[in-house]
Image: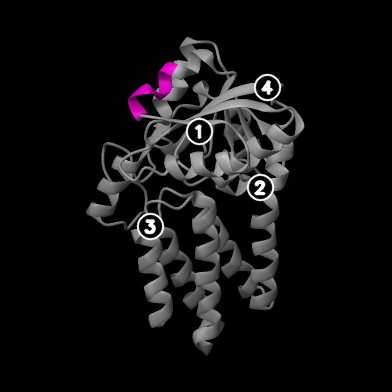
Amino acid sequence: MLGPAVEDAIEGIAADRTSSASRLARVGLETIALVTIEGAGWRNPEVLKEAAQRISEAQPAMAIVHNIVYLFAKLVAEGQPPMEVLRELHAELETARERIARTFLKVAVPKGTYVTLSYSDNVLESLRAAHERVSVARVFVMESGPMFEGRALAKSLATSDIAATLVPDSEGPTHVKEASAVVVGADSILRDGSLINKTGTLSLAVAALEQSKPVYVVCESMKFDSRYDAASWPGASHGTAGDSRASRPLIDRIRQDFEVIPGKLLTAIVTERGRYTSDVIQTMLSPGRKG
């Protein structure tokens, strides 16, 4: 029903283990927009709903993928032209990074040293902005095996004249002692204020607590996920949760690639709309909250 090009794109999204959540959101958005090009069936709202569900289930740990495709489907179902919606949402995703970076500048310290891991467009943009404004002394980047996305982040930082040291995953937490802060991206922020992010993030957050260092999460507010808490998200240890139809191999991969970091270990979630504590996130995403 969705067409071969769309089916191929969804398969590509599901197989991608190295791209950031922000990048996969852009791919997901372009994929659901492709549904409106391949045939007239999209004029039935159920077709776009099916596409949104399929794309969301391809990366169930990444809230921004879910939120962006369902928002596209909703706006088009309300009668807005698909290509206009695509342009507007794409612009929102592209400009969010710069706005997040401006918010991060409010917590960046002069000549700060940071520890991070994996690859995050928002971490890269935030550290670039900090380096331009107050200078960054050094960034320790965990390699983030088994896909080693941290290598790409370290290279991008170096290209921006930021001193970046690539370190083995086992050594990352030991560098927190000499850092000004831990700064990481996010795959999702759950309704209980927990963070879902690359495996290895929890060890950094625990080390930061032990060393009384702040932990900043830089991400789009579109990564807020009101569907799940730590006990019910698809990678929860007790089994497949909620209404997820993800396959067992995919669930196993989620558990390998991602982990839950309790909100109490996070100093602030830094977004394009401002800074939030995990307590505020809980209030914002509460199931009983109106508006």
Q: Is mark 1 on a helix, strand or loop?
A: loop
Dot 3 crowding, Cα within 10 Å, few <14, some 14–19, many 20+: few
Dot 4 crowding, Cα within 10 Å, few <14, some 14–19, many 20+: some
Q: How far apart are marks 1 and 2 (CA)?
A: 24 Å
Q: Does the image show residue 272? A: no
Q: Is mark 2 on a helix, strand or loop?
A: helix
The type of residue carrying mark 2 is Arg
Dot 1 crowding, Cα within 10 Å, few <14, some 14–19, many 20+: many
Q: Distance between the residues labelled 2 and 3?
A: 21 Å
Tell me, yes or no, whether the two marked residues, 4 and 3, touch with CB atoms within 8 Å. Answer: no
Q: Nearer the viewer, mark 1 or mark 2?
A: 2
The residue carrying mark 3 is 16
Write the residue at 57% across / 47% down.
121
Q: Nearer the viewer, mark 2 or mark 4?
A: 4
- Asked whether, in this view, residue 216 is left or right of residue 168, the answer is right
Q: Nearer the viewer, mark 1 or mark 4?
A: 4
Q: Is residue 194 above or below residue 44?
A: above
Q: Nearer the viewer, mark 4 or mark 3?
A: 4
* Dot 1 or dot 3, earlier in sequence: 3
Q: Give the range drawn in magenta.
A: 169-174
